[in-house]
Image (tube, coloured by chain):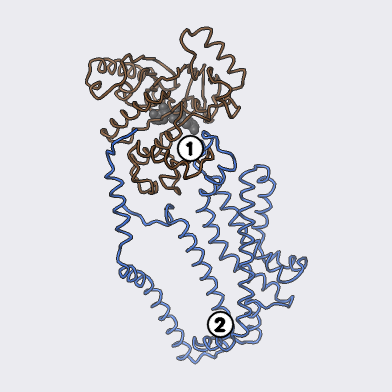
Amino acid sequence: MKTSPTDRNDALGQATGTVAKAPALVSLKNVSKTFANGTVALRDMSLDISRGDFVSLLGPSGCGKSTALRIIAGLGDASSGSLAWPVRSPVDDKSGTGGPNQDISFVFQEPTLMPWASVFSNVYLPLRLKGLSRTAAREDVMDALQMVGLESSAGSYPRELSGGMKMRVSIARALVTKPKLLLMDEPFAALDEITRFKLNNDLLHLWEKFGWTVIFVTHSVFESVYLSNRIIVMAARPGRVVQDIAVDAPYPREEEFRTSDTYNDYCRQASQALHSAMEVSEPA
Amino acid sequence: MTMATVDNQHSLSGEKNRKATKSLPEAARWISVAGRMAIPLMMLVLLITAWSLYVWAFDVPHYILPSPMRVAVALYTDWPILAPALLVTLKITFTALTIALVGGVALAVLMAQSRIAERALYPYAVILQVTPIVAIAPLILIYAPSTQAALLICAWIVAFFPILSNTVQGLKSTDHNLLNLFELYGASRWQTLVYLKMPNALPYFLAGLKIAGGLALIAAVVAEFAAGSAGAGSGLAFRLLESQFRLNIPRLFAALFLLSLTGVAIFLTTNTISYLLLRKWHESALKREN
Ligand SMILES: Nc1ncnc2c1ncn2[C@@H]1O[C@H](COP(=O)(O)OP(=O)(O)OP(=O)(O)O)[C@@H](O)[C@H]1O
Ligand SMILES: [Mg+2]
């Protein structure tokens, strides 16, 4: 969605006027999305995301999580409502469209790799599009591949990888640009538990180290509690926010956190929220 | 940023598999190739024997059905006449194919980039394609500067469409999520075309090329048949007609043989090109490994 300058000013006024804390990095206001076939994927979704947050979108299948993420990324317009980047300085906005293109990365729900390109070339893509040469990008690409434990598969083609490995390539491609805002759509759903836990920890470390903002879509209550400092619980048909849970547990979180009482309490709370979200959702 | 490698076993075993298929003994591969060739070759021998036997047993006159031996002799003795004709046909076919390839791809790119260009041009490409070439050939013969040029135009018209329509299809059937990804990373139109749409269209284009290769030869022959009365013919099709008029049936068969051979050669060439370009990634060039 291309936000017009007026939208941005509105949102900025709103943010400074009514919200006491730091202005949001990205702000959805009454966003609705109706698809061409009449499906109402989102209705009146409002959400402010602060810089540096690790936010999870938690909700039943089909509740519009992917749709919301796409709208935030500027892929596909909302049918109504607005998307604004209140604190974005004009300097950040290189494309001049108000869009966030320069520093967003997106991990799609599917690996979305180019089948004709090697793992290396797939991860190199975002840098290539920025005009970096292969040799100049080599180190960054290999670093990103190392983060997901795939540096030895750089020369393989996607068809030679397992489903989980493809997903990790896709994650490496998102990390290679060192994005300010990382949008992840169920990135770990296809992975075994051990790898998933490891990547959870890796992601948390990177997030703390680089001060990214992460919006993370998941089905898993446990994953959302472990990772995020804020959980947005959504209900389906129409997709909307039903609860906003602040997870008040300190970082860095290590494996011990998974067995702590705080963790259990939050899991219970998020679980209940999810259950009530399922109940208020109309049957598909 | 250092992360342990939890399940590198996947990648390692993948590496192993690749090496295994590579180090498959050369000899075994040759045997399997020979095995695959053996059946069609045996079939060929069988057919030629049956043909010879039939001609010999029923004493068929050679101006009705010449024996394979006679055809072979005709091929040899008439080679000075047939070879230049073959060359002309080859030249027309390949020139037409090359122009069709360049023009088809260029036009496809234009159409995929601009909706207006597509609306303006595609209908006419379709009309050109659906009108039988034999029907247009006489007209083209009138308007073209020379018979050679007319033949070329005919072959081009026929070869051009499969390349165009397949390439357009390929350029347009790019995965939407990949398009989203390119948009997200601020790719220019040009980058999206070169890095995403073109590689994606390659298998489609190659499928079009395979069809176009065969059609170019057919059209070159058909057009020459149509041009036959206009004289000046020296391609294989003209020799074919000429042999028929003169009841030189062995030479007719020899010319026919050369045409088939050309067709097969084109087929094998386009198939090989396609295989070489796609073997790394496209399903059509890969063995199923389960
Ligand atoms: N292109 C489309 N056309 C029509 N309806 C769509 C389209 N994409 C999604 N939908 C519908 O919109 C709703 C939300 O879809 P979305 O993909 O956002 O769900 P989700 O929360 O990501 O689900 P999941 O967890 O299963 O991925 C669904 O009911 C789906 O049927
Ligand atoms: Mg989804």
Identify the residue shown where x is 60% and y is 81%.
B83
B130 and A195: which one is in front? A195
**Element on which disc 2 rests:** helix
Residue A281 lies in quadrant:
top left
B282 and B264: which one is in front? B282
| Residue of label 1 | B177
Q: Chain of mark 2?
A: B
Of tags 2 and 1, the one toward the viewer is: 1
- The correct choice, above or below, for A242 with respect to B256 in the image is above
For marks 2 and 1, give the CA distance: 55 Å
Identify the residue shown where x is 28% and y is 49%.
B13
Quadrant housing the C terminus of chain A: top left
Q: Position of residue B29 (x, y in %)?
A: 33, 67
Report crowding for label 2: few under 14, some 14 to 19, many 20 or more residues within 10 A (C-alpha): many
Identify the residue shown where x is 56% and y is 49%.
B169
Identify the residue shown where x is 67% and y is 78%.
B234
Residue A271 lies in quadrant:
top left
Q: Position of residue A82 (x, y in %)?
A: 55, 19
Of callouts 2 and 1, which one flags the residue occurring earlier in the amino acid sequence? 1
Q: Which mark is residue B288?
A: none
Q: Position of residue A6 (x, y in %)?
A: 62, 17
Residue A173 lies in quadrant:
top left
- Display colour for chain A: brown
| Residue of label 2 | B254
Taking A173 as reference, is A93 left or right?
Answer: right
Report crowding for label 1: few under 14, some 14 to 19, many 20 or more residues within 10 A (C-alpha): some
What's under tag 2, amino acid-wise? Ala
- Asked if the residue at tag 1 contacts the one at tag 2, i.e. Cβ–Cβ closer than 8 Å, the answer is no
Q: Chain of mark 1?
A: B
- The correct choice, above or below, for B79 with respect to B10 in the image is below
